[in-house]
Amino acid sequence: MNYFKGGRICKYCGINMDIEDLDILEFIHGTCWQEYRKNGEIYPMPANED
Protein backbone atom coordinates (compact mmCIF):
# COMPACT_ATOMS: atom_id res chain seq x y z
CA MET A 1 0.00 0.00 0.00
CA ASN A 2 1.29 3.45 -0.88
CA TYR A 3 0.63 5.74 2.08
CA PHE A 4 1.46 8.86 0.09
CA LYS A 5 -1.05 8.66 -2.79
CA GLY A 6 -4.81 9.03 -3.03
CA GLY A 7 -7.26 10.30 -0.44
CA ARG A 8 -6.72 13.49 1.53
CA ILE A 9 -3.01 14.33 1.50
CA CYS A 10 -1.50 16.28 4.42
CA LYS A 11 0.27 19.38 3.17
CA TYR A 12 2.93 19.04 5.90
CA CYS A 13 3.97 15.37 5.92
CA GLY A 14 2.44 14.23 2.61
CA ILE A 15 0.66 11.14 3.97
CA ASN A 16 -2.80 10.02 2.89
CA MET A 17 -4.87 10.91 5.98
CA ASP A 18 -7.51 8.31 5.08
CA ILE A 19 -5.34 5.20 5.51
CA GLU A 20 -6.58 2.50 7.88
CA ASP A 21 -3.19 1.76 9.50
CA LEU A 22 -3.45 3.99 12.56
CA ASP A 23 0.05 3.14 13.84
CA ILE A 24 1.66 4.40 10.63
CA LEU A 25 -0.65 7.41 10.54
CA GLU A 26 0.19 8.38 14.13
CA PHE A 27 3.93 7.89 13.58
CA ILE A 28 4.16 10.00 10.41
CA HIS A 29 1.25 12.44 10.80
CA GLY A 30 0.90 12.67 14.59
CA THR A 31 2.01 16.29 15.06
CA CYS A 32 0.82 17.90 11.83
CA TRP A 33 -2.28 19.31 13.56
CA GLN A 34 0.11 21.63 15.42
CA GLU A 35 1.40 23.03 12.12
CA TYR A 36 -2.12 23.66 10.86
CA ARG A 37 -3.02 25.46 14.10
CA LYS A 38 0.26 27.43 14.22
CA ASN A 39 -0.38 28.69 10.68
CA GLY A 40 -4.06 29.54 11.35
CA GLU A 41 -5.32 26.90 8.92
CA ILE A 42 -8.32 24.63 9.26
CA TYR A 43 -7.39 21.00 9.78
CA PRO A 44 -8.97 18.96 6.94
CA MET A 45 -11.70 16.74 8.36
CA PRO A 46 -13.06 13.69 6.54
CA ALA A 47 -16.24 14.10 4.55
CA ASN A 48 -19.44 12.84 6.15
CA GLU A 49 -20.27 9.51 4.57
CA ASP A 50 -23.86 8.35 4.90
Image (cartoon, rainbow, N blue to C red):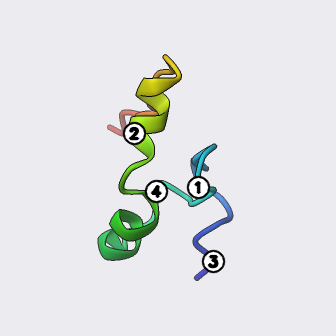
* Frontmost residue, 48 versus 28: 28
Q: Residue at x 48, y 31 (%)?
A: 36
* Dots 2, 1 in contact, CB < 8 A: no
Q: Which residue is mark 2?
A: 33
* Three-letter code, disc 3: Asn
Q: Residue at x 60, y 47 (%)?
A: 12
Who comes first in sequence, dot 3 or dot 4?
3
Of circles 3 and 1, which is in front? 1
- Please provide percent x and percent y for residue 11: 63, 43
Report the Cα–Cα distance between label 3 and label 4.
12 Å
* Dots 4, 1 in contact, CB < 8 A: no
Tag 4's secondary structure? loop
Report the Cα–Cα distance between label 4 and label 1.
14 Å
Report the Cα–Cα distance between label 3 and label 1.
14 Å
Who comes first in sequence, dot 2 or dot 1?
1
Q: Is residue 49 visible in the rendered structure shown here?
A: yes
